[in-house]
Amino acid sequence: MTIRRRDFLTLAGAATLSGGLPRLARGADNSSIYDLERFGNARILHITDTHAQLKPVYCREPSVNLGIDAMAGQPPHLVGNAFLDRFGIRPDSADAYAFTFLDFEKAAGRFGRLGGFAHLKTLIDRLRGDVGPGRSLLLDGGDLWQGTGFANATQGADMVEAANLLGIEAMTGHWEFTYGEQALRANLERFKGEFLAQNVFLTEEAAFNDAKAFDPASGRVFKPSVIKEIGGHRVAVIGQAFPYVPIAHPKRFTPDWKFGIRDEELQKLVDAHRSNDKVDAVILLSHNGMDVDLKLASRVTGIDVILGGHTHDAIPQPISVANPRGVTLVTNAGANGKFLAVLDLDVAKGKVGNVRYRLLPVFSELLKPDAAMAALIEKMREPQAGAWSDKIAAADRLLYRRGNFSGTFDQLICDALRGELNTEIALSPGFRWGVAALAGQPLTMEDVLAETAITYPQTYTQSMTGGQIKDVLEDVCDNLFNADPYYQQGGDMVRVGGLSYTCTPAETVGKRISELKLDGGRAVEAGKSYKVAGWASVNEQTGAPVWDVVANHLRSGKPPNRQASPVTLRGVENNPGIAGPG
């Protein structure tokens, strides 16, 4: 059974740091903030959406993360001071820097970069050592292998080595699938942990042709779950891969597989673990996205905790969701290696009694980097580091990606597409992965690749009517703001260049986008054709990789476009999911 309401312990939030935390020398081992009080008898550590960021990073959290309808004002749709108030975090503190965008550049100078696998390794080993052998488990929620030029060049093979050294025991996937089946399976042959995905099945044609599957009888392509002995108790971990891989990415990467949320199959699997395997706890390792997980938790019973990912939401405390048989806790652990989630369970026979959860920011300057991991990282970077480390330009302002409607690095990409491909309009995908660069920071090809490194980077130009452009915007907007989370695929609004529009998120599909205008204020006409540039098309393209287009634009020295956000919002006044541009 799931955690009962009367058994539910008030959760401990993130370990709040002192607002006066000093800027420490790099590598200083002054990490007493990570001394956690012992609790329970089983510790699960969780990272997700690291996007192959092996080195410490700057990463600005969003100033716009709107929730609409029942999701308005509820986690994860809180930003800025509303976020701090909801989770009891002090303004101007190290936690405020880690979890929000507030005073980001000033705080970045004060508290430094976060994450880095060598620093994560030190912290993970410490937290595992604190509870002793056989009492902990390290899980990864996916998007581990993609997000940098180095990972793209090796099709994720470098990240498998890093994952093995880190000690990941089970993971699920999303962008991992975009390397294609051959590369994915080759990586999994080298991965020492378990790859879990209960919701990936063979297509009917692939099954007829006896395509490879973990369970040919059911058509499940991968192992759905694993039972681990932790602290003398049996814990089932079920993997939930990103449900919309063939929709969000080119289907040619996974032609034999079909995905989906598949909550009915999930319920059967949970019930089997509870009744047949007599497990004491059930954990869902999910890459659904937080809104999807919150709905799923209300429908599927028997899950104790959902360790979530995909939407990059760093939520300090789990959200308790009631369902017909109890309560399920839903979490989401941020991105880019910035955070390490610590789930301490007090497990008894057949149930979880109490829980303590902390989402710890990984302050790289408070953790001595692990020597073996640092050496591995340098070895893996060596083949390309020289070619990608030369300065191309300098950041003319804070460059970041995350935000529902725009980000300054996305605006730079749109400028490059328009300028280099000579088009009126540019469209760029609203990916949430990508890190930040501070104003004045040198920009290298490595930095450009950290925003663009995918397996379908080709640029294109095409003629589109104003009506078609509006339809694209409406379709992506419905994905972002559909009132039913099961119709949300994650990510943010497509970015636009040379174009502005008004968005009313609370409207229904087809009615959210209006007042489309070109630069200069001319109205976009529904029946008129416009030349549009883009990249990351699900259809095969033959243009130059987007990273070359952006690098050429930066080298040209053209003055940056400092246009304000091209989106005017309506109907979101007083919504705590908006506190600034983006």
Image: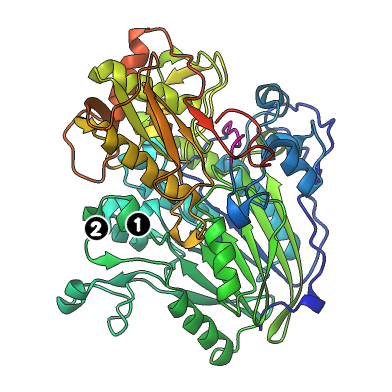
CA gap between label 1 and label 2 equals: 16 Å
In the visual, does 199 lie left or right of 46? left
Residue located 21% across and 77% down the image: 207
Residue located 43% across and 12% down the image: 560
Secondary structure under the numbered disc 1 in the rendered image: helix
Quadrant in the picture for the C terminus: top right
Q: Nearer the viewer, residue 309 or 535?
A: 535
Residue 214: x and y in percent read 33, 76
Q: Nearer the viewer, residue 387 or 514?
A: 514
Judge whether 330 appears above or below 474 on screen: below
In the visual, does 187 lie left or right of 99? left
* Quarter of the figure with residue 8: bottom right
* Quarter of the figure with residue 109: top right
Secondary structure under the numbered disc 2 in the rendered image: helix
Q: Which of the numbered marks, if any, corresponds to residue 411?
A: none
Judge whether 242 appears above or below 314 on screen: below
State the residue position of label 1.
245
In the visual, does 58 lie left or right of 322? left
Quadrant in the picture for the N terminus: bottom right
User: Label 1 amino acid?
Assistant: Val
Q: Which residues are magenta?
A: 57-65
Judge whether 565 appears above or below 494 on screen: above
Q: Nearer the viewer, residue 160 or 201?
A: 201
Residue 289: x and y in percent read 52, 56
Residue 34: x and y in percent read 76, 48
Q: Which of the numbered marks, if any, corresponds to residue 182?
A: 2
Q: What colouring does the structure picture have? A: rainbow
Residue 465: x and y in percent read 23, 32
Q: Nearer the viewer, residue 538 or 200?
A: 538
